[in-house]
Amino acid sequence: MKILILCTGNSCRSQMAQGFLQSFDANLEVHSAGTKPAKHISTRAIQAMKEIGINISHHTVKHVEQYLKSEWDYVITVCDNARETCPVFTGKVRNRLHFDFEDPSLVSGTDEHIMNVFREVRNKIKNTLYEFYVKQIKTKNN
């Protein structure tokens, strides 16, 4: 099963989502990309995931254009901007889904406050994607 997760910068939400799906099922082929990729993955996203035992520090930021001709079982957007600016895929996409999560990289305040927002978004991504995994993937594979 091939899954592509898209957001704007590919530095936080899509990277965390990729990490979660890979942790749920090692047999999934999961990629993430951005419509306007950042220069690197957010260190706070890496830290938030590390706190719960998932290492995404080896992930790299990618542009969605490199995936447009591929076939996908699911293309999942995790922010409204990516959904609105998502390019046309010339490959086959069986299912398109959208889950909107707050962008924690836009939050300001103390380091503690910002990390708490990263944790909240991380937990929402985990819960949403686990529900998706159980209902859409695990049940189809059993």
Image (tube, helix red, strand yellow):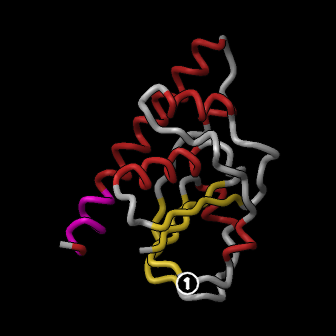
Residue 133 is a magenta residue: yes
Q: Residue at x 70, y 58 (%)?
A: 34
Of the 4 image quadrants, the one containing the C terminus is bottom left
Q: Quadrant of the N terminus?
A: bottom left
| Residue span colored magenta | 132-140
Residue 106 at x, y percent in the picture? 69, 33
**Circle 1 sits on which residue?**
71
State the residue at coordinates (52%, 70%). 75
Q: Please name whichever residue, 15 or 99, is drawn nearer the observer in this view of the structure.
A: 15
Which of these two is toward me, 139 or 6?
A: 139
Residue 141, by quadrant, is bottom left
Residue shown at 68% from the left, 45% from the top:
11
What residue lies at 59% left-to-right and 55% top-to-bottom? 80
Of 24 and 100, which appears nearest the observer?
24
Residue nearest the observer in this picture, 27 or 122:
27
Q: Quadrant of residue 45?
A: top right
Q: Is 70 inside the magenta-drawn segment?
A: no
Give left or right: position of 52 versus 113.
left
Position of residue 25 in the picture relative to residue 115 (left or right)? left
Give the overall secondary structure of the magenta segment: helix
- How many residues crowd mark 1 within 10 Å: few (<14), some (14–19), many (20+)? some
Decide: is 105 above or below 7: above
Query: In the rendered structure, which amino acid carries the disc numbered 1?
Result: Glu
121 left or right of 7?
left
Q: Secondary structure at mark 1?
A: loop
